[in-house]
Structures are given as structure tokens and as C-alpha cells.
């Protein structure tokens, strides 16, 4: 059969369909039918803005505490699912978030995985996370990291519950089909370094004379304690006017490289003085916000939501956002910006 020259009238719908029917059995498909949905003019997140109230989630988490032990669960966590994509354990298209509970005397047994994790502590008094042979105690406002493939277990030796937010890049790892996980023989790993060791080595603007980070491109700082980060943030808030879009914000850095603390997840702390409202901006990273202190009203496209202490919210990629503080506020944010920057995807627009 001769090939029709390109100038000929287009083939009928039926003729095209007959052609497509020949493609499918050969595992082929016509790009021109799907191109507009594959490469979009601007980002269009499937996710929606949403808020989880601590007062609603905490009682359910405590109820879960009565149903099974941390050890049986391995990790006793209520996953925060974006309401637009239920059943996928996603808070944004690329991020996982959940609220984890450890009860007095419990141990969440040691394991390790390709995925990097962060913990942001909401309630804690002496609970601990151990990573790579070092323990750190978990107190409200602490930002604790788990490097990829680092052994980690969590526990509580005192008599109060410990509750924190987990953020993981596991969907990025799974997207690349690159994930591994191991379980340790012992519930708790052997402690080989004193508490505060990583902070002493890397957390004072100094670093060991030989050797780099023990965790590759992940920060060597294990716990960015609120006891250190809050005074730093508040001291900068006293100097100069707040940034129009960001208010007073400090990002958590890897002290050896100046990059974000985690290879995939960006983290920062924002102070909004009472009455301050940020100007509209949008960016390609999906963000999870946790109000640590005060109260903040988020305007996200046409959705308005007010978050109080320990409430968690999600801002999908490329949604225009504004924040307004009804009380002096401090907000912890994590997003996939760290990964996006490395891949040269990150883009933002400030108005
Ligand atoms: O604490 O290691 O929320 O492996 C999900 C997977 C927490 C953890 C989660 C995990 C962990």
C-alpha cells in the first residue's frame, strides 16, 4: 500500500481507530492522542489543600495505641492522606506524612531503608530516636533526621507518650523502583556514641579535620533541636523587616555543604509576627506545614484554613499561597524542593 503524502486530507476517525487497534497488541500507542496531558503548560497538582487538626488526630492515635504495640505495628502511624488521592499514602504527589506514637516502655524496632525520613516532634519528654549508634532525645519542636540506609529505632523510657510527624521521600524512591529495607536482629541497635556526638562534631560551625559526613550528601547533624533553632529564628526576627513573601524564615542546612539537610526534602522554620500577612506566591514544590506556635490562616488558591498549634496542613504544588498570623506564630515546613532543585525542576513565582 502506498503511503499518502502529508498534504492529503486527514483519515477518518474510524480509519484512525482501526490503526490504533493494530498498535495496542504491539504495545505501542499514538503520542498525539495523549501529548497534551503528558506535557502540561503549567503544573496541575491532583492534590488539594487540606488540614489535619491535632485535637482530632491525637485521640485516634491514642486509640491505635490501645489496639496494637509499636513493636507489632513496626511503626504505629496514622498516615495523612491527601483527600483527593485516598489509598495511596500520599500527602502530596511525592511526599509521605504520618503521625507516630510511642507509648512508655515501647520500642519501635530497628530497621533501615533507602528512603530518607524526618521527624518533627509535637509531644515528647524523654522519648528517643537512635540512628547509626547514637541516641537523641525527642522534645517538642525538634527536627530529627534519619539518613537513607541508616539503622533507626525509636523508644520511650519515661512515662509519657511521644508523638511526632514523620515525613518521608518513599514515593520518590518507589517512583524510581530503587527501594530496599532491612530489619535488624535486635530490637534496639547497639549504642556506640554518646548523645550529642554529632552535634559536637558538626553543630558548632566546626567539623572534624579528617573525614566528611558519615551520611554522604545527608547532613551529619542528627537533631536540629528547637532549643537551638527557636532562639536563632527569633533573634533574626528582631533585625530588619520581614521578607514580603517568606516573613522571617531560616532553612535547616547541611553544615558541610550549605545544601538542605536532606537530599530530597527541604525544611525550614518561619516566624510570622502577629498581624503580618505574606504576599501571594507559588512554587513547584508541594509543602507540608506544621504550626508549632500561635495561629496561622493559610489562603491557598480559593481555600482558606486556619491552623493552630500542632495542626498540619498541605499546600499542593503551584497553588498560590499566603499566610496571615492571628497570633505570633512559628511554622515548620517540609517540601520536595530539595529534590526538585537537584533535578533543575524547581520554579517559583512571587507577586
Ligand atoms: O519511623 O522508620 O511513618 O519506616 C513510615 C515508615 C515511619 C520510621 C513512618 C517508617 C517510619
Image (spheres, rainbow, N blue to C red):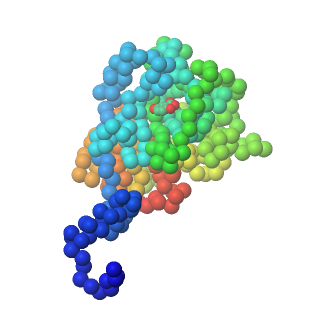
Residue 142, compared with residue 300, is above or below; it is above
- Residue drawn at (65%, 35%) of the image: 199
- Residue drawn at (45%, 22%) of the image: 73
| Residue 126 appears in the picture as rendered | no
Pinpoint residue 90: horizontal percent, then vertical percent. Answer: 38, 41
| Residue 22 appears in the picture as rendered | yes
Q: State which quadrant residue 88 falls in.
A: top left
Pinpoint residue 182: horizontal percent, then vertical percent. Answer: 58, 31
The N terminus sits in image quarter: bottom left
Pinpoint residue 128: horizontal percent, then vertical percent. Answer: 55, 24
Left or right side of 332 for 19: left
The C terminus sits in image quarter: bottom left
Left or right side of 276 for 217: right
Q: Nearer the viewer, residue 201 or 271?
A: 201
Pinpoint residue 347: horizontal percent, then vertical percent. Answer: 43, 61
Give the total number of marks visible in the rendering.
Answer: 0
Q: Report the residue that reaches farthest toward the front.
A: 1
Q: Nearer the viewer, residue 138 or 27?
A: 27
Residue 323, compared with residue 341, is above or below; it is above
Q: Nearer the viewer, residue 61 or 67?
A: 67
- Residue drawn at (38%, 33%) of the image: 79
- Residue drawn at (48%, 14%) of the image: 104
Q: State which quadrant residue 60 falls in.
A: top left
Amino acid at each position: 500500500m502506498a503511503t499518502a503524502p502529508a498534504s492529503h486530507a486527514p483519515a477518518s476517525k474510524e480509519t484512525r481507530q482501526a490503526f490504533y487497534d493494530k498498535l495496542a497488541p504491539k504495545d505501542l500507542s499514538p503520542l498525539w492522542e495523549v501529548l497534551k496531558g503528558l506535557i502540561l503548560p503549567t503544573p496541575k497538582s491532583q492534590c488539594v489543600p487540606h488540614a489535619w487538626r491535632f485535637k482530632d488526630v491525637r485521640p485516634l492515635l491514642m486509640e491505635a495505641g490501645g489496639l496494637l504495640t509499636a513493636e507489632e505495628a513496626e511503626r504505629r502511624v496514622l498516615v495523612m492522606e491527601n483527600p483527593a488521592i485516598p489509598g495511596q499514602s500520599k500527602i502530596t504527589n511525592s511526599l509521605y506524612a504520618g503521625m507516630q506514637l510511642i507509648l512508655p516502655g515501647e520500642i519501635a524496632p530497628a530497621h533501615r531503608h533507602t528512603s530518607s525520613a524526618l521527624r518533627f516532634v509535637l509531644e515528647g519528654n524523654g522519648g528517643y530516636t537512635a540512628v547509626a549508634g547514637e541516641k537523641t532525645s525527642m522534645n517538642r519542636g525538634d527536627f530529627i533526621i534519619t539518613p537513607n540506609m541508616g539503622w533507626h529505632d525509636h523508644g520511650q523510657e519515661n512515662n509519657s507518650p511521644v508523638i511526632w510527624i514523620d515525613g518521608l521521600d518513599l514515593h520518590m524512591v518507589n517512583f524510581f523502583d530503587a527501594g530496599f529495607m532491612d530489619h535488624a536482629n535486635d530490637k534496639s541497635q547497639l549504642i556506640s556514641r554518646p548523645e550529642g556526638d554529632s552535634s559536637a562534631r558538626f553543630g558548632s560551625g566546626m567539623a572534624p579535620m579528617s573525614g566528611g559526613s558519615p551520611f554522604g550528601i545527608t547532613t551529619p547533624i542528627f537533631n536540629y533541636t528547637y532549643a537551638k533553632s527557636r532562639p536563632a529564628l527569633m533573634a533574626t526576627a528582631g533585625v530588619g523587616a520581614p521578607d514580603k513573601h517568606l516573613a522571617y524564615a531560616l532553612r535547616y542546612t547541611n553544615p558541610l555543604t550549605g545544601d538542605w539537610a536532606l537530599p530530597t526534602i527541604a525544611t525550614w522554620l518561619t516566624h510570622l509576627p502577629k498581624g503580618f500577612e505574606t504576599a501571594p506566591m507559588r512554587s513547584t514544590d508541594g509543602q507540608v506545614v506544621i504550626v508549632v506556635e500561635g495561629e496561622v490562616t493559610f489562603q491557598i488558591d480559593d481555600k482558606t484554613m486556619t491552623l493552630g498549634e500542632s495542626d498540619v496542613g498541605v499546600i499542593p504544588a503551584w497553588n498560590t499561597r499566603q499566610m496571615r498570623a492571628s497570633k505570633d506564630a512559628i511554622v515548620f515546613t517540609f517540601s520536595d524542593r530539595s529534590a526538585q532543585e537537584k533535578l533543575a525542576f524547581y520554579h517559583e513565582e512571587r507577586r
